[in-house]
Amino acid sequence: APLERIVRDVSRAYLAKLDTWTATITPNETPPFGGGFDDVYDGRRDESGRKTQVRKFCCFFSVGFDAAISHRFTRRRERDPKSCSTAWRNKAWYAYYGAAEFVNGGGHLLGEDGKPSVELRVDGERIRVTRDLNSVQVFNIHSSADGVDFWGTNRASVKGELADDAFAPPCVGDGMLEVVGTRGVSDLVAARSGFSHSLRLAQGRRVELWTSSSVAAQMDGETWVLPPSSAVITHAGSIPLCVGPGATRNLRPGLETSGGGGGGCLRL
């Protein structure tokens, strides 16, 4: 029975650590903000009286084309729930919006002047966001968009990105995040197929991102339109993670604990 199988798998599992992260988002402008921020605003303000939202996540945060695709799907589901009532229908809609993005998309991270509208710093170091990038993605768990590993675990770095000796093997419990830049749907398809990975931009413990134009954003699958804002991502502690049988990514065996503690990372 399914329940018996779940109980059996849990009894054979081990505990590891899963990092959690806090994103503090502060719009640049005074009210009204628009762009969807008011839909997710939690009532906080910073010292200058500006609205500030503090949100926690475990998996990923991104701005750009991938969030735009998810946001279009979310709006579709809100308008017509019956059209998104099964897994295959949902995947069909994602494929539709992905195809539309491939044909007509681009420029998600560009301002009206054609220059990049996103500034990125990781551990205080400014990271260049080039004009050809259509998404900046911040990962703790390297699986998004139905299982895509944009970082490309165990793939060698290529010219123009973070060198192999400049980062540690990604891990869900090491207190660090990985940041990549993706050009568009073609990069997503290549990463899904295992032919390549997105541009590795940085690895670090603190990520700061500024946007000068409104852009689609998502956090652990929840989407909204982010107005010109600053977003500061910092470590918020860790929680126990129950690791069951089967293939794993970004977990290290041999650090199992019998109660409450944490394990580390596996590079497959």
Image (cartoon, rainbow, N blue to C red):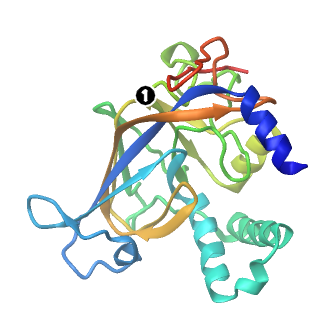
Q: Residue at x 77, y 70 (%)?
A: 90
In which quadrant is the C terminus drawn?
A: top right
Which residue is disc 1 drawn over? 175
Q: Is residue 183 above or below residue 172?
A: below
Q: Is residue 146 above or below residue 75?
A: above
User: Percent from the top left, x then y, of residue 4?
Assistant: 84, 44
Residue 160 visible in the shown view: no
Q: Is residue 170 above or below residue 107?
A: above
- The one nearer the camera, 201 or 57, is 57
Q: Residue at x 80, y 66 (%)?
A: 91
Q: Residue furthest left?
A: 48
Q: Is residue 184 left or right of residue 211?
A: right
- The one nearer the camera, 160 or 224, is 224
User: Percent from the top left, x then y, of residue 253?
Assistant: 67, 16
- Circle 1 — which element? loop
Q: Is residue 10 above or below residue 98?
A: above
